[in-house]
Each structure stands twice: as C-alpha cells, then as structure tokens.
Image (spheres, rainbow, N blue to C red):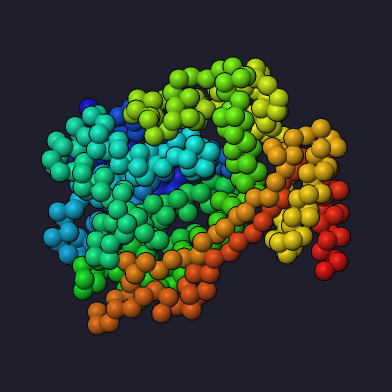
C-alpha cells in the first residue's frame, strides 16, 4: 500500500492522506471499502444536474471534503486544548462516514422511498463488518461512538456532535462551497480559513466562535440562505421530485395487476424499506435506480411510461409560483389546472397538483456560541443579520403539463387581479 494518497480536490486543493499516521491509515482503509466506493455512484445534488449541468459531483467527493475540513478544524482546536486529541479517531471517522447511508439521488430518496440516511449511516457503521472491523482495529468503541453521533440530537456540551451535526458543521462548511462551485452560482465564497481560525472552546467545553469570526459566520449563513432559495429549493428540483414521487406511487398501486418488472432489492426499497438488509441497501445507487427508470420507460404502462420518459429525457412538467394567492384562490387555480388536464387526456391526480416548499431559517440550537474570553452569548444576540436569517420562508407551486402553461399563467393573473 502506498504510504500517501493525494486527492486533487477543486475546493480544498490537495488532500493528502498519510498512512504513516494511524488515524489517516484508518481513513484510507475506510475509503477503500465497497460501501464507501458506492458513494461515487450517488450524486451530491440529486436531480439538480437537470438544471445546473455542472452539478455532477458525488457524495464520495463531498465526504472526502468533509474529512478534510474536520482535519483542519481538529488541528486548530488541539492548539487551544491539547487533550482534544483524544477525539481524533471519532471526529475523522464520523466526518468521512456521515453520508454513508444515502440512497439514490441523495436527499430525493428521503422523499420518494421514505428513506432515513442518518439511520443507515449508523447501521452501516455499527453493523456492516467491513466498516466495523476497520474501526474496531483503531478503538473497540469507535463504531458505537460514531454511530451515536449520527443518531442523537445535538447536545449543548458535546463538541464532536457540534462539529458533525449542527447549523455550522464540517458537512455544511464543505457542501456550500462545493455546491456553489459545481453549479456555477458564485454568490460568494465561505471564508473557511477565517471561520476555522476563530474556533475555540467555551467554558462548558463545547465549540465556540471568537468575536473576530462573526462576520465570516454571517457570510456563511447568507450564502446558505441564497443556496437554498436558488438551488436546493429550485422549482426544477421540486418538479423532478414530484415526478419521481408519482412514479413510485403508480408502482405501489399497480404492481400486482400490471406485472411491473423490478429487482428484488428494489421491491424492498419501495414496498418494505424497514425490512431492507444491508446487502440490499448497498445495491441501490443512481445507476441501479436509473436502470429501473429506463426499463419502466420502455416496458410498463401509462402513465408510468410517460413519467419515466419525462424524467429521463428531461421533458419535465412545468410549475408556476402561486405563493402570493390566498389559499382559496390556490384551490381555484388547482381546479382550473385539473380541468385542463382532463380536457387533454392527462390524469389530473398524477400530472397536476400543488407542491409546498419551505426553507427553514438558521436555527440557534445554542450548541455554538460566541465566547470572548469573559462572556458567552448566542450568535443572534451579537448579529442583527443572523437574527434576520432565522426567519423561515414558505412558498407554493402549481405543477402541470407544459402544453397549457399560457392558460395556467393567464388564469393566475386573472385571480391575482381580482381580489
């Protein structure tokens, strides 16, 4: 085995893993497992590449990046508190493996398969022998300690949990930079080095931010807000998810009478996800799922074939914003759209509907505070901008076939002009 391995990363540049160091030998061995290599076949941004053509990077790439961020933060915090070094293996392992449990198209699986990636990350870390055996070689309690980080809620005095799962953690510090880069939407760059240099420990032993880091944190949270509004909650993502939801809905309601082909493991993913075994979980990735979509596109029944064709060929449904309409008028536009569907031989329950979107503002969990050496306070108490960013936003879309887009938007205009 090579002593060193270099990952040439577009965000963090050279990420060098040195197997002469036990904690990095562990990382190298984990990377080489089948379960981690599977992440190469899962897109970081799901179906967002249908809109942002550069959004083709994988959960593998992101996970390597999160490890790199965690290592930088670790080195900074050990300068502040040398005894923090006892957490090295836990932090490195959790950072690398935090997304091990993602299903195909990443977070899209959470919706269409009712999948819980945190549960599966924990399950693989604690119960999948190739992973657990590596971890136990470097600490008998490592699998359970890392698994607990994926399962439990944030604790006020747990610095490792704060670094792995909080509003400002290693995961977010990587994906906001990476997703902005890959989508070409350069609204701003996170000042990662400034944030890391401002990290310290509060009196309760948790991670804190020195006052010099407040502006960098503000910048980070502004970018987060913009990325959710323009990428993660973009209408194309919502439409794509709607189509996939309807595909799974049709399969569930027609499997017995339509003789739909699917692999046994895909059957479990759709019908009995709680009964999935680890080997069946690992089979499903973007390639496996797309293979099924291709088969259903060519050999199933209507309207399943049409929906699969829409997704595969990117001939999507359309969506219009109706957030500004009162609820009663949203129902009116839905009724109008459904009538148009029926007049044009579309199943109105499948090809038309209202999809609610929500963006949750920054949540102060009190797990990360400002510490100036004398006084400790929450982030929002030191920044009016951060307080503003805590506001949540909700919006509504009407989804429908594109061929009568003009009719729908005209009717929306009429409803809006007649209060």
Give x and y (percent) for residue 114: 47, 40
How many numbered markers are drawn? 0
Residue at the extreme bottom of the image, as rendered: 374
Q: Position of residue 317 (x, y in %)?
A: 72, 40
Residue 376 in the image: above or below residue 404: below
Residue in view at x 21 percent, y 71 percent: 204
Kindly give the residue lying farthest to the front in the view shown. Answer: 257
Asked if 8 appears above or below 298 in the picture, the reply is below
Image location (x, y in percent) of residue 355: 65, 50
Using the rendered view, name the quadrant where residue 5 is placed.
top left
Quarter of the picture containing the C terminus is: bottom right
Name the residue at 62% across, 46% down. 238
Asked if residue 2 shows in the view, the reply is no
Q: Residue at x 33, y 29 (%)?
A: 278
**Quarter of the rendering containing residue 328:** bottom right
* Viewer-closest of 10 and 381: 381
- To which quarter of the image does residue 417 belong? bottom right
| Position of the N terminus by quadrant | top left
Q: Is residue 11 left or right of residue 31?
A: right
| Front residue (pair 267, 359) | 267
Query: Visible in this render: residue 168?
Result: yes
Residue 41: where, in percent of width, then height?
46, 31
Relative to 130, residue 401 above or below: below
| Residue drawn at 47 percent across, 49 percent down | 178
């Amino acid at each position: 085995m090579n002593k060193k391995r270099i990952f040439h990363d577009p965000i963090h540049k050279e990420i060098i893993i040195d197997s002469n160091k036990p904690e990095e030998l562990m990382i190298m061995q984990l990377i080489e497992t089948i379960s981690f290599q599977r992440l190469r076949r899962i897109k970081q941004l799901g179906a967002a590449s249908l809109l942002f053509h550069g959004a083709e990077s994988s959960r593998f790439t992101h996970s390597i990046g999160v490890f790199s961020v965690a290592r930088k933060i670790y080195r900074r915090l050990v300068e502040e508190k040398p005894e923090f070094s006892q957490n090295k293996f836990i932090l490195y392992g959790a950072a690398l493996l935090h997304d091990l449990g993602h299903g195909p198209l990443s977070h899209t699986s959470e919706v269409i398969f009712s999948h819980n990636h945190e549960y599966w990350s924990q399950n693989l870390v604690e119960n999948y022998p190739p992973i657990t055996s590596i971890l136990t070689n470097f600490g008998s309690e490592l699998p359970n300690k890392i698994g607990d980080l994926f399962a439990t809620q944030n604790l006020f005095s747990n610095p490792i949990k704060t670094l792995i799962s909080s509003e400002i953690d290693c995961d977010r510090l990587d994906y906001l930079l990476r997703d902005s880069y890959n989508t070409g939407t350069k609204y701003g760059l996170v000042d990662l080095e400034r944030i890391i240099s401002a990290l310290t420990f509060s009196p309760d032993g948790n991670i804190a931010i020195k006052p010099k880091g407040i502006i960098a944190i503000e910048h980070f949270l502004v970018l987060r807000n913009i990325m959710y509004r323009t990428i993660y909650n973009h209408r194309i993502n919502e439409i794509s998810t709607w189509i996939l939801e309807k595909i799974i809905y049709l399969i569930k309601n027609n499997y017995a009478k339509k003789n739909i082909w699917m692999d046994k493991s895909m059957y479990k993913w759709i019908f009995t996800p709680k009964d999935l075994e680890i080997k069946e979980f690992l089979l499903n990735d973007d390639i496996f799922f797309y293979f099924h979509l291709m088969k259903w596109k060519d050999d199933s029944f209507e309207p399943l074939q049409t929906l699969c064709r829409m997704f595969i060929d990117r001939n999507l449904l359309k969506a219009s914003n109706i957030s500004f309409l009162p609820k009663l008028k949203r129902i009116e536009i839905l009724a109008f759209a459904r009538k148009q569907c029926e007049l044009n031989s579309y199943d109105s329950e499948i090809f038309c509907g209202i999809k609610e979107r929500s963006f949750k503002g920054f949540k102060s969990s009190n797990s990360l505070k400002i510490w100036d050496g004398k006084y400790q306070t929450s982030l929002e108490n030191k920044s009016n901008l951060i307080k503003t960013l805590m506001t949540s936003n909700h919006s509504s879309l009407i989804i429908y076939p594109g061929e009568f887009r003009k009719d729908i938007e005209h009717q929306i205009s009429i409803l809006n002009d007649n209060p």
